Image: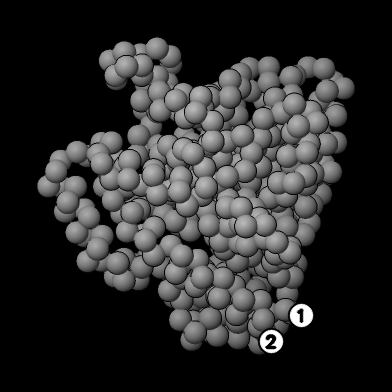
Amino acid sequence: MQFIDLAMQYQYLKKRIDARIEQVLSHGAFIMGPEVFELEHRLAEYVGVKHAITCANGTDALQLSLMVLGIKPGDAVFCPTFTFFATAEVIALVGATPVFVDVDKSTFNICPLDLEKQIERVIAEGKLKVKAIISVDLFGLPANYSELDRIAKEYELKLIEDAAQGFGGELNGKKSGSFGDIATTSFFPAKPLGCYGDGGAVFTDSDEYAELLRSFRVHGKGQDKYDNVRIGMNSRLDTIQAAILLEKFAEFSFELDARNNIASAYTEALKGNYRIPNIPEGYLSSWAQYTLVSEKRDCIMAKLKRQEIPTAIYYGRCMHQQAAFASLGYKDGDFKVAESLSRYVFSLPMHPYMSADQIDLVTQALVTNK
C-alpha cells in the first residue's frame, strides 16, 4: 500500500499524459509553451478568479505574492505556526518578519482570536509595521475566511491565501484559491492536483497584481525578457508539467469526489475511537491529508508499519520551534494548541485510487486492539 499512489494514477491516465508530453516534445516550446496558457485559463475558470499565473513551485508562488504586495524589511506578516516551513520562510526571504499565530483546536487552521491578539501585541510594541496575513488551508480545509477578511479590513492588512493543500476545497460554494487579496497553490506531486515535478500558481482578481506577477516571474521583465524594469525571479512553469497538469485536471472532479468518499469511509469506521477531522458546516475539504489525533501516536504508527500500512506526521515541529527562527525569541509553550498537535497528529493513506479493501485494512488495523 502506498501513502499516495502516484504510479496507480499514472497508469489510469497513461495514454492521455503520454500523448500530451509527446505533443510538447513535437512542438518544442518547452518553456512558456501553449499548454501553460491553456492551463492558466482553465485554472482561473475553475477557481472563479480573473487571473491564474503559473510559476515554478508553491514556495515561489508565495514569495511572488509578497513581492507584488510590496512586503519589505520592517513589515510584520502573520502566519500560523502549525504549517510547512515554506509559509514562514518566504516572509523572511523578502526581509520581513514572520509573526506566528496559534491554530484552532477543531480545524487546525489559523485561529482568528489569537491572530487579533498577536496583531495587537505587535502594534503595541511599535517595532514593526503590521502589513499582511498568510492563512493556510491546512490538509485541504479552507481557513475561516469570514473572520480573516473582517480582521484584515479592520487592521488594514493584506490577506494571502496559501492554498497549497487546499485546491479543490470550498467555503460556502466559493473555491479555495479565490479568498483574500491574492492566493497561491502548489503542484508538488503529493498535492490534490500535482504534476511530476515542481509547479505552482497565483490567483487574483486584480489586473495590477496579475501584470506584476507576470513580470516578476520572468526576471522583472517589461516589454520582453531583455527589458528588465524591476528585480524579479526565474520562476516559470515548464510546458511538460503544464501538459501533465491539463490531463490530471480533466480528472480532478472525479478524484475530489473519490477523496471525499474515502474520508467519509474513514470517518464512519473511526468515529468514537479516534479524534477525527472536523469539517464545519458549509466547508468542503479536498483532503490533502486525513489526519487523526492520538496521544498514543507512536505506538499506533509502529503497529500500522508492522502491517505495511504507511503513515506520516504533518507536522512534527512548529514554526516557532524551528532553529531558523530562533532569533525571534519564541519558546516552547507559546502556542499550546499547535504544540499539542505537533506531538499527537498522524496522517493515513489518502489518494483517489484506494480500493475498498485497502480502506478496510487501514480502519481494521486502527480499531482492532486499539
Q: Quadrant of the N terminus?
A: bottom left
Where residue 367 appears, as percent x and y from the top left, is 67, 84
What kind of residue is marked 1? Gly
Residue 89 placement: quadrant: top right
Q: Is residue 315 visible?
A: no
Residue under the image location 78 percent in, 38 percent down: 150
Residue under the image location 14 percent in, 43 percent down: 27
- Above or below, 338 against 69 in this view is below
Q: Is label 1 in a helix, a strand or a loop?
A: loop
- Any mark on residue 369, and which? 2
- Above or below, 215 against 227 in this view is below
- Any mark on residue 211, and which? none
Residue under the image location 83 percent in, 23 percent down: 123
Judge from the rendering whether residue 356 lies leftward or rightward of residue 38; answer left or right.
right
Colouring scheme applied when the structure was drawn? one colour
Where residue 25 appears, as percent x and y from the top left, is 15, 47
Categorize mark 1 by other alpha carbons within 10 Å: few (<14), some (14-19), many (20+): few
Compute the Cα span from label 2 to label 1. 14 Å
What kind of residue is marked 2? Asn
Q: Is label 2 in a helix, a strand or a loop?
A: loop
Q: Which residue is mark 1?
A: 272
Q: Earlier in the sequence, mark 2 or mark 1?
A: 1
Where residue 232 appears, as percent x and y from the top left, is 42, 21
Residue under the image location 49 percent in, 84 percent down: 356
